Image (tube, rainbow, N blue to C red):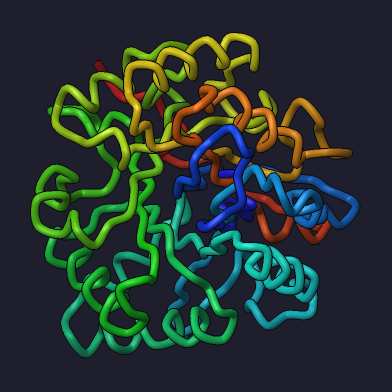
Amino acid sequence: MLFCKVSQWMTRIMPLLVPAVCAKKTATAAVNDHRVVVATEHVSLLPLISDKSNIPVTHVLIAAIHITDDPGVHLNNYPPENSLFDQVWSDAAQLQAAGVTVMGMLGGAAAGSYSRLDGDAASFEKYYKPLHDMIGTYNLQGLDLDVEESMSLSGIIRLIDRLKKDFGASFTISLAPVAAALTEGGGNLSGFSYFDLEKQRGSSISFYNGQFYYGWGDASSASDYESILDDGFAANKVVLGLVTNPSNGGGFVALDKQATVLQELTSENPTFGGVAGWEYFNSVPGGESAPNQWATWMAQHACKIGSILKVTTICISAEAHQGLTLSRPFHRHYQKPST
């Protein structure tokens, strides 16, 4: 989630150079925040790759992509070709050249994209085409499907199958469920069962960016993550999605406490799937002046000497990245699930 998420926000990066003490590993990112973001300067992604021998992030997600009724696509409030995003796409290309996987994030709390893709065959083709064209135009290497509205299982399977057919087996597909949706009987915003989806299309899904915040999961201990594994999901497919700054929403965990949790998770789960951050521009400890430090910190603390690297995903909000004021209404995914 480092996200380089544009409010879900985001870009992902997949193949990355990692510290010499760790083996290379692919991780995931997730993006899940629709809030008010106020930034006044361009926030560059390039510090993430300043040290080419030790890049701390695997995926960057650019968000959020929305399918409009025209039909068309917007990156938050504007078409992706708007000149406001020129620097975003330039940074993304340089990250890709350095080995980071750059993805888009579709959906989030602003509903509509998935309902438009969940109709009959003619309707699907109508709304899928602008998404397809955007992926190709901007050379996105994958798509994070953040389904926070009701969608049928057959609908999400159709979308996954079509993406793989059109962009090939190497195209990365991830999903961003609230963490509770990965447990038996847990709260779920997506309509379909992630257990059923994993059974039917698990081979096409690289990882799940679990949202362990806003009351849908608790990252301050290993318990909720372990519950997901106990219920059948593999550790290498479950990414621990974190809030990167307390101002980004509920569920932030102080880094010193997070370090203890990461040490427990990596020691007990050698194939731990990694961590993701929502979102990039103000990530602590560096804050707005050095948001890249979050990824470096996570890579260091999620990696045991001599073991597999547990890397991060970053979410970026495209509009925050461009120094715009981005308004997003609070939506249902901010609400704590009923018990």
Q: Position of residue 326 (x, y in %)?
A: 71, 53
Q: Residue at x 14, y 27 (%)?
A: 231
Q: Residue at x 37, y 71 (%)?
A: 170
125 to 90, vertically: above or below: below
Toward the viewer: 55 or 67?
55
Q: Position of residue 19 (x, y in %)?
A: 63, 39
Q: Residue at x 39, y 87 (%)?
A: 129
Left/right of residue 100 with respect to residue 150 in the rendered view: right
Toward the viewer: 303 or 6?
303
Q: Position of residue 110 (x, y in %)?
A: 47, 55
Residue 34 seen by the camera: no
157 to 20, vertically: above or below: below
300 to 196, vertically: above or below: above
- Which quadrant of the figure contains the N terminus? top right
Left/right of residue 69 with respect to residue 224 in the rendered view: right
Residue 195: image quadrant is top left
Q: Position of residue 167 (x, y in %)?
A: 37, 81
Q: Residue at x 32, y 24 (%)?
A: 269
